[in-house]
Image (cartoon, rainbow, N blue to C red):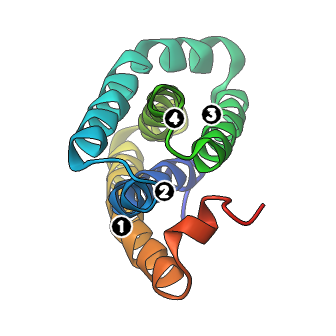
């Protein structure tokens, strides 16, 4: 059975994998260049790195569940912002910073949960589960995103019809 830590990490992996798969397609559809895409992915990585300490601190002070819910809300808002800004590069950069922080943070929260709720061999199993689940969901993200884009187009996903 999948642990809560595995679920949290899997959610982060799914968002991260889907984001990396869809971003170049979305950027092309809204007129951004490959250079813009590389810059946005760099901002995503900076967000993932910069948010690790604050998310760990929040998990210690507010709990893993509360912090995970906050990360999920922030990620959802960032995705909505990204999908409705079209080609505004500064707003997309802010959304990518938030997404990078939250997706990396969900992996961190999965690890924190495993550390807080197990010991010994169970700790090893829970950490392995968090790692494998994150990796599997990261791989599944592009498959699902590819299916969605293949049966529509990313421009319609980006709110051009709203």
Whether residue 136 can be seen here: yes
Q: Which residue is mark 4?
A: 88
How far separated are the C-alphas under marks 1 and 4? 32 Å
Tell me whether circle 2 and circle 4 mark residues in contact (CB < 8 Å).
Answer: no
Badge nearest the viewer, 3 or 2: 3
Quarter location, residue 21: bottom left
- Choose the circle earlier in sequence order: 1 or 4: 4
Structural crowding at the residue carrying mark 3, measured as other residues with C-alpha within 10 Å and reported as few (<14), some (14–19) or many (≥20)? many
Of badges 1 and 4, the one in the foreground is 4
Select label 1 or label 3 by which is in front: 3
Residue position marked by numbered label 1 in the rendering: 136
Q: Are discs 1 and 2 less than 8 Å apart at CB?
A: yes
- Mark 2–mark 4 distance (CA, rounded to whole Å): 30 Å
Provide the secondary structure element on which disc 2 rests.
Answer: helix
Residue at left 70%, top 17%? 62
Q: Nearer the viewer, residue 145 or 31?
A: 31
Indicate which disc residue 71 carries: 3
Q: Secondary structure at mark 4?
A: loop
Classify the position of the C terminus by image quarter: bottom right
Mark 3 or 2 closer to N-term?
A: 2
């Amino acid at each position: 059975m999948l642990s809560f830590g595995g679920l949290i990490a899997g959610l982060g992996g799914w968002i991260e994998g889907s984001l990396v798969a869809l971003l170049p397609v979305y950027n092309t559809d809204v007129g951004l260049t490959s250079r813009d895409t590389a810059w946005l992915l760099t901002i995503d990585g900076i967000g993932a790195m910069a948010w690790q300490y604050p998310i760990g601190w929040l998990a210690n002070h507010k709990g893993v569940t509360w912090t995970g819910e906050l990360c999920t809300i922030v990620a959802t808002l960032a995705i909505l912002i990204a999908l409705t800004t079209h080609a505004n590069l500064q707003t997309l950069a802010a959304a990518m910073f938030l997404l990078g922080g939250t997706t990396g943070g969900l992996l961190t929260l999965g690890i924190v949960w495993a550390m807080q709720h197990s010991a010994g061999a169970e700790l090893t199993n829970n950490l392995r589960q968090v790692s494998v689940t994150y990796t599997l969901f990261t791989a599944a993200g592009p498959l699902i995103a590819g299916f969605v884009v293949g049966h529509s187009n990313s421009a319609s996903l980006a709110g051009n019809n709203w």
